[in-house]
Image (spheres, helix red, strand yellow):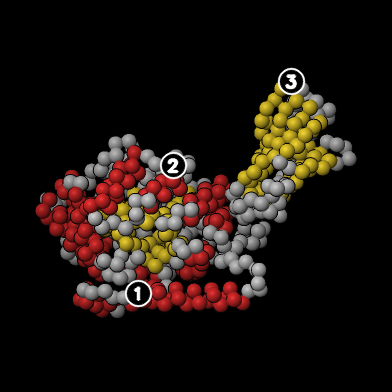
Amino acid sequence: MRMIRTGARAASGSCRPHGRLRAAASAATTALLTLTALAALPQGTAHAADTLGAAAAEKGRYFGAAVAANHLGEAPYVSTLNTEFSSVTPENEMKWDAVEPSRGSFSFSRADQIVNHAQSRGMDVRGHTLVWHSQLPSWVSGLGATDLRSAMNNHITQVMTHYKGEIHSWDVVNEAFQDGSSGARRSSPFQDRLGDGFIEEAFRTARAADPNAKLCYNDYNTDGVNAKSNAVYAMVKDFKSRGVPIDCVGFQSHFNSNSPVPSDYRANLQRFADLGVDVQITELDIEGSGTAQATDYGNVVRACLAVSRCTGITVWGIPDKYSWRASGTPLLFDDNYNKKPAYHAVLSALGGSTEPGGPGTPGAGCTATYTTAEQWSGGYNGKVTITAGSSPISSWSVNVTLTAPQKVVSVWNGSPTWDSSGNVMTVKSGWNGTLAAGASTSFGFTVNGGTAPPPQVGACTAA
Ligand code: 9MR
């Protein structure tokens, strides 16, 4: 059956819009249902989506996952994919070694499996990737310049034609720049034999093959402003000024403690968008767990939402166990497909609804951490930082216990009451009770009557 369809794709050589039309029809149906649902709600009741894809759609974005064809037989994998995501990226199935393992011999069956699944559910598909130094069959690396040029252009043309009209964005060239401070292109068969011009040539060939697909350059370690992202920025700026067809830049966003979410992440996305291209977060994963991981995920989503040309986010896998970095538990679902705090932070950042404290919402509530801000002989200023868990909160409360003769003489950014002993102070939020998932505020207090022992700060409770 696949053979017939593949043959038809190749033979027609023209746009096969059924996939896109089906997706559009499905989007229209969703829009209609959303409108109906909104109309049915009592006036004044906020409507909040309860899946990643639906919440992102309400913000005009897609929310996707990298998908591996060999997991499509696993029921909870498929149901999580179908329920939560509106876009898929084949994790490995569209790479050169998978689709053209020997010269001129194309094999699309694994990738087709993913595309068919996506289409049957009205999901978009990101194409990943056409020209990359990795997962490149050895026959390509062995070619001389002339042969390599025609092999590259043929590869782009054949693959894009097979999926013509069915891919919303293609990673045309992947990871062509070096890490570090050089800003140079990475050595690869393409770079070494064809020179800098191979990237431009690949984009021009891609535009001719499928004029309706968005053409992206995709890379990692380009998420903040740095030498590597500056080099990519200069290339995109040059392409735009010379009319080389490029529509989008993908920021892979693989984060861990060595490569944390940069503080200028949003600003970096924005400066690329300002060049006149869309930006997409293409391979998001963040190693870690609990509140810290949730906070990072929420910040990434908020950065994308703050940039109008950030059109979508793809996480690089569904459950942690299938991540390329499984030991770092970097994804939104645990090995049993339970939603992690990071999931709730993402849904909440997208404006979706999560049930605070409900089943499957570990990390909801708040945490309180104490530091001594200033100290002098006979007293100190204490500071307590309150951080919301994986769901937004509207008020918080913390107990602070002092040891006599220490006494609190003033409190700011919180509203205190004391127990009968005078040693236990309960501080409740005032104006600063409303916190987004993962967001923080603090209150402070001055103590006279000694500096030791430090105050005991109890558990934070939230509503
Ligand atoms: O997740 C992919 C993993 O299964 C492959 O073994 C690996 C091979 O290079 O590629 C992984 O995906 C990469 C993506 O295609 C490009 N950016 C980096 C990703 C993580 O390595």
Quote the CA–CA distance across marks 3 and 2.
Answer: 42 Å
Q: Going from the N terminus, do you reach mark 1 or mark 3 first?
A: 1
Quote the CA–CA distance across marks 1 and 2.
Answer: 38 Å
Circle 1 residue: 19
Q: Does the residue labelled 2 lie within 8 Å of ligand 1?
A: no
Above or below, 42 against 439 in this view is: below
Circle 1 crowding by C-alpha within 10 Å: few under 14, some 14–19, many from 20? many
Residue at x 68% of width, y 27% of height: 374
Return the residue nearer the eye: 142 or 350: 350
Asked if labels 2 and 3 touch by Cβ distance under 8 angstroms, the answer is: no
Q: For the view shown, which residue lies furthest in the top direction?
A: 377
Q: Going from the N terminus, do you reach mark 3 or mark 2 first?
A: 2
Circle 3 crowding by C-alpha within 10 Å: few under 14, some 14–19, many from 20? few
Residue at x 39% of width, y 47% of height: 271
Kindly indicate the quadrant of the structure image that contains residue 185: top left
Task: Name which residue type carries label 3.
Answer: Ser
Question: Which percent across, then down, holds residue 385?
Answer: 65, 40
Q: Residue 259 carries which label?
A: 2
Question: Which percent across, then down, holds residue 313?
Answer: 44, 58
Return the residue nearer the eye: 389 or 199: 199
Task: Name which residue type carries label 1.
Answer: Gly
Asked if labels 2 and 1 touch by Cβ distance under 8 angstroms, the answer is: no
Return the residue nearer the eye: 72 or 270: 270
Asked if labels 3 and 1 touch by Cβ distance under 8 angstroms, the answer is: no
Secondary element at image label 2 = loop
Task: Name which residue type carries label 2.
Answer: Ser
Q: Name the quarter where the N terminus is drawn.
A: bottom left
- Horizontal arrangement in the rendering, residue 241 relative to residue 227 (left or right): left
Q: Going from the N terminus, do you reach mark 1 or mark 2 first?
A: 1
